Structure formats: structure tokens, C-alpha cells
Amino acid sequence: MWHNSMARDEILKQRWELVVTHLSNQFADGDTLELDAIIYLIGLQELGQIHRKFKKDEKVNLMHIAICRLLEPFGYYEFDYFDEEGWPHYKIVEQLPSLKAGEQSILMKEAIVQYFLEKKVIV
């Protein structure tokens, strides 16, 4: 049992590094992007309005969209509808368990890796 989780962590770590490298090269001239920046980029991708400036509160909403989309396959959120401005809305299916900060970031990394595997950005 112990070995499996070690192997899984190692695979996650490697895939996470692939995602970070890929996105950092594409969007940040190779400067390493932090988790939040990657979540923000996913929000942009999901909204599909890449080429416009966002106000501060919209940036928060973008991150929210990304988190909903990322955690949807895990059963926490479900896509509901697009509003008239094209913003996706999600409903909560299951409350997120209360996670310590470290666990939360592992869950998000797992979800992001999953997202980019689905999009065939990494293999």
C-alpha cells in the first residue's frame, strides 16, 4: 500500500512539473508560475476571453471558475449555465472537505494535472 501512494505522489510531482514548465514557457517567459497564476490561466481559458483586461473582482471570479471546473471531475461542482456575458456558473454538488493548506494545494495540483492530461497538453 505504502509503495503505491509513494509512486502516485512521484507521478503527480513529475506531471505537475511538466505543467508548470509548459505554462511558464508559454506565458511567463520561463519564469516559474505559482499555483494561483496557473489557476488564473485556467479561468481565462475556461472563459475564453483571453484578450481583454480584467478588473480585480473579475480576477477573483476567474479563479473561482477555474476552481469549479477543476474540481468538477472530483464531484464537488457541476456546471450549471453560461450567463449573458459568457461566464460559466457552477453549482456545489458536495461541500469540499475541510483540508489543511498543504492538502488543499495537493488536491488542486492533482486536479490541474488531470485537466491538462484531458486537454492533451501533457501525457
Image (spheres, grey):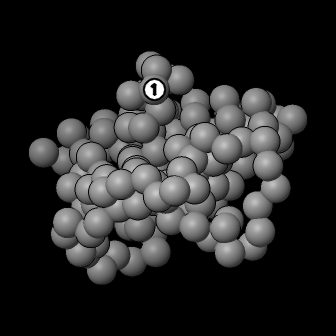
Q: Residue at x 29, y 66 (%)?
A: 91
Q: Residue furthest left?
A: 1
In the figure, residue 103 lies in which quadrant? bottom left
Looking at the picture, how far across and down is residue 23, in whole percent? 68, 35
Q: Which of these two is toward me, 70 or 50?
A: 50
Q: Is residue 104 left or right of residue 3?
A: right
Residue at image x 58%, y 30%?
18
- The amino acid sitting under disc 1 is Lys
Q: What is the quadrant of residue 19 in the picture?
A: top right
**Residue at horizontal 68 percent and vertical 75 percent from the top:** 57
Q: Quadrant of residue 108?
A: bottom left
Q: Nearer the viewer, residue 18 or 57?
A: 57
Task: Pick the quarter of the image with the C terminus.
Answer: top left
x and y percentages locating residue 117 in the rendered image: 42, 28
List x then y, in percent, for residue 22: 66, 29
Residue 78 vs 30, above or below: the answer is below
Q: Please give the residue where the numbered disc 1 appears in the rendered image.
A: 119
Label 1 neighbour load within 10 Å: few <14, some 14-19, many 20+: few
Decide if residue 35 is in sight here. no
Q: Secondary structure at mark 1?
A: loop
Whether residue 63 is visible: yes
Instruction: Tell which residue pokes out farthest to the right in this image.
Output: 29
Quadrant location of the N terminus in the rendered image: top left
**In the image, is residue 87 above or below residue 122?**
below
Front-most of 47 and 119? 47
- Seen in the picture, residue 37 relative to 118 is either above or below; the reply is below
Q: In the rendering, at what x and y percent does residue 46 appear? A: 53, 44
Residue 29 left/right relative to 7: right
Q: Is residue 10 left or right of residue 58?
A: left
